[in-house]
Amino acid sequence: MSENILSEIESKKIRWVNLLLTDIVGQLHLVTISSKLVNNESLREGFGKLDGSSVPGFKEIFESDLVLKIAPDTFKVDPFFEGTGDAFSLIYDMFGKNRLGRDPRFAAEKSGDQLKAEGYTPFAAAELEFHIFDEVKVWVSGTSSGYIVRSKSAGFEKKKDYSLPPKGGYYVPPPIDDSIEIRKEISEILEDAFKVRVEAHHHEVGAAGQGEINFEMSGPEKLGDSVQIVKYVSRMVAVRRGKIVTFMPKPIQGDNGSGMHIHVSLWKGNKNAFYEESDNYAMLSQEARYFIGGLLYHGRALSAIVSPTVNSYKRLLPGYEAPIFLAWSRGNRSAAVRIPSYYKNSERTKRIEYRPPDPSANPYLAVSAVLMAGLDGIKRKIDPGDPVDENIYHMPEEKVKALGISKLPSSLDEALKELESDFSFLLPVFAQDLIEKYIEVKREELRKLNSKISPAEFYYYLNI
C-alpha cells in the first residue's frame, strides 16, 4: 500500500497532502503537509503533527502530542485544490505506539472487528439529508439573537413566501427543483474523485431546497469516511456556486428536518443473516428480530449519540416522518425501526433501517453504537415484540401504552441521562473514557446553549 501512495503522489504531481481526522462530536479537521514528508518511513511511523488538546474531546493540555498515520486505501486526489491529495488518518497516542481510544474512527474499526469476531460481516449505509440555502444570517449579542434563511429554489425568505408548500418538495422535478445541478455535481465528484458510489439523489420533502444523497453499503469506518466526504464535497460545491449547505437537523420551523437514516445488514459468508424466506411478515430471520430488539431496548441511550444536539429534538416531532416511538414495522415511517419492503424475496436487499439518527451525529460513533446495540440484542436474544403496522402518530396515548411502546427522549439532557445509565453495550468497542468525555463535551455544549436567549423568547416574553 505504501508503494501505491508514493507512486500516486509522484505520477499525479501531488505537492500537498491533507491528513483528515474527526473530533469527538463529528467535526472534520485537517492538516496539510508537504508531500516531500511522505516516504516509507513516515508512512510506517506517522507524522507528529497533532495537538490533541486543541481537538474537542481528545486530550488535556499536559498530554497533547499525538501522531497521525495515513489510513490504508483512503488516499485520493483532491478535486478542488490542484496538486493536493486527501487521506484519512489513524490517530496514535504519544510516541505513536498505541491507537488513541477517543478517536471516533477507531471505534468504528473496532465495531467491525467485534462483529467479525462473532461471525458476521457488517454492511451499513446512510440516507444523508441536507438543505441548500442562498443565504444564512445569524446574529448573537448580549441582548438579542436571531437568524434569516433565504432559499431561492423554494422562493423562501424569513420563514414565509414558499413557492412550494411546507412538506411539498418530495421528488419535485426541475425547474421547480433548481438544486438538481448542485446535487448532480456533488454526486459526480463523490464518484469520480473519492470513489463513493452514489446510488441516488433527489429533492426531499422539505420545501426550502432540501436534498438527499444515498450511497452504497460498506463497513462501519468506510461509512463514516463517506459521510464526512459527502459533507466536505457538498460544502465545497455549494460555496463555489454562492450557496450554503447545512446538515443541521431542523433549520426550518414547520417543515421537515434532515435525517441520516442508517441501514444495516449482517452477512455470514455469502448469506444474509437477516433474511429468512419462510418468514411471512417481512422475510426476516430470528437474528434480525433480536437485532431489532437490541435497537429498541437501547434506543433511548442511543439517542445521545445518534441525535446529539439541542436542535435534533426539534426534528423529532410527530407529523414530519421523524420517529419518536421505539417500535418496529415494515414500510412504516412512524416507527423507529423500519424494514424496507420494496421487494418481497430479495436476500441481497434485506436490511434494517434505524430512523432516529440525524446528520449532526458523529457518523463513526453513530454507526458503531447502532451495530453494538443490535449485536447486544442478538447475544441476549432480546424480543422486539410485535410489529406495529399503523400510524403511531395518530394512536391514542392509551393504546401506545397498552402496546408497551416507549418514546425516544424529548431533549438532549434526557438522552444524556439515558446514556449515563445504559452504556455497557458499547464497551466492547467504545473506550469508557470516550463515553465519559463525550458526555462531558455534550453537557458543556448544552450548558452554553441553555444560557443563550433565542428570538422565540422575545416573541413570547417581551411584554409579559
Image (cartoon, rainbow, N blue to C red):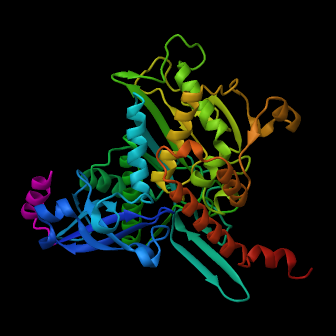
Of 384 and 418, the residue lying toward us: 418
Q: Decide: is 109 above or below 389.
A: below
Q: Residue at x 63, y 50 (%)?
A: 303
- Asked if the stretch drawn in magenta spans residue 390, the answer is no
Tell me which segment is drawn in magenta. 1-15
Q: Residue at x 80, y 75 (%)?
A: 457
Position of 26 relative to 59 (above/below): above
Q: How many marks?
A: 0
The furthest residue to the right: 464
Indicate whether 427 appears above or below 289: below
Q: Does the rendering let one see residue 26?
A: yes
Q: Quadrant of residue 261?
A: top right
Q: Residue at x 50, y 71 (%)?
A: 134
Q: Tell me, yes or no, whether the highlighted magenta stretch contains residue 13.
A: yes
Horizontal and vertical percent position of residue 125 = 44, 42
Q: Which x, y percent locates residue 321? A: 65, 44
Q: Is residue 210 left or right of residue 107?
A: right
* Image location of residue 15, percent across then percent down: 14, 72
Q: Residue furthest bottom?
A: 142
Left/right of residue 199 with respect to residue 368 in the rendered view: left
Question: Can residue 183 be seen in this snapshot?
Answer: no
Foreground: 450 or 438? 438
Name the main secondary structure of what is drawn in magenta.
Answer: helix
Horizontal relation, residue 57 to residue 396: left or right: left
Q: Quadrant of the C terminus?
A: bottom right
Name the residue located 50 percent from the left edge and 39 percent from the top edge: 371
Pinpoint residue 341: horizontal percent, then vertical percent.
54, 26
